[in-house]
Amino acid sequence: MEKTIDKEKLPLCSGEYVLAVKDTMNVISGKWKLPIIGSLSYGVKRFKELEREIQKITPRMLSKELKELELNSIVKRTVHDTTPVTVEYELTPSGKKIKRVLDAMVAWGLEHRENVMG
């Protein structure tokens, strides 16, 4: 039986805090997952749209990362029965919540850049 983590008490227990950070990092780790999530946070996209928006990602890597994000229930893949077949990608409700993490990272990055560069 899985143990439920009380989010209110989480900061008081470093072990569970670290485990939660590791779980998050396992889902979003790598060079491309956050840019993919960032792109999809602006709406449903087709594969080629993602490939154009995310500079320097190869089709093979994009496909691999999308599969991993789908396995982790961050991205939903929808295949439409059209000719040719249309495949669309969108964030799941859980994936949409990661936008808060991205927004916090952007805010921190801008502040950090300003502090470091003056």
Image (tube, rainbow, N blue to C red):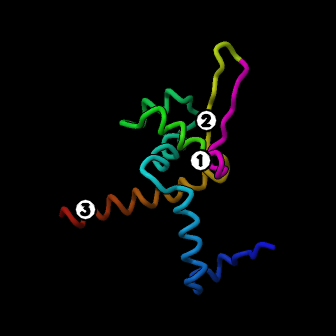
Name the residue: 64% across, 45% down. Answer: 70
Query: What crowding class fits label 2: few (fewer than 14 Cα within 10 Å), some (14-19), or many (20 or more)?
Result: some
Per the model, the C-alpha gap separating discs 2 and 3 is 35 Å
Name the residue: 53% across, 53% down. Answer: 99
Name the residue: 51% across, 59% down. Answer: 101
Q: First in sequence: mark 2 or mark 1?
A: 1
Numbered mark located on residue 114 in the image: 3
Report which quarter residue 8 is drawn in.
bottom right
Q: Is residue 102 left or right of residue 107?
A: right
Q: First in sequence: mark 2 or mark 3?
A: 2
| Tag 3: amino acid | Glu
Query: What crowding class fits label 3: few (fewer than 14 Cα within 10 Å), some (14-19), or many (20 or more)?
Result: few
- Expressed as whole percent of the image width and height from the top left, the position of residue 109 reads 34, 60
- Expressed as whole percent of the image width and height from the top left, the position of residue 87 reads 63, 27
Query: Which quarter of the figure is the N terminus placed in?
Result: bottom right
- Expressed as whole percent of the image width and height from the top left, the position of residue 75 reads 62, 44
Q: Is residue 21 magenta?
A: no
Q: Badge 1 is on which residue?
A: 68
Per the model, the C-alpha gap separating discs 3 and 1 is 34 Å
Q: Relative to residue 101, is residue 40 depicted above or below?
A: above
Name the residue: 70% across, 16% down. Answer: 82
Q: Residue furthest left?
A: 118
Q: Nearer the viewer, mark 2 or mark 3?
A: 2
| Tag 2: amino acid | Tyr
Which of the two residues, 50 or 118, is positioned nearer the viewer here? 50
Numbered mark located on residue 89 in the image: 2
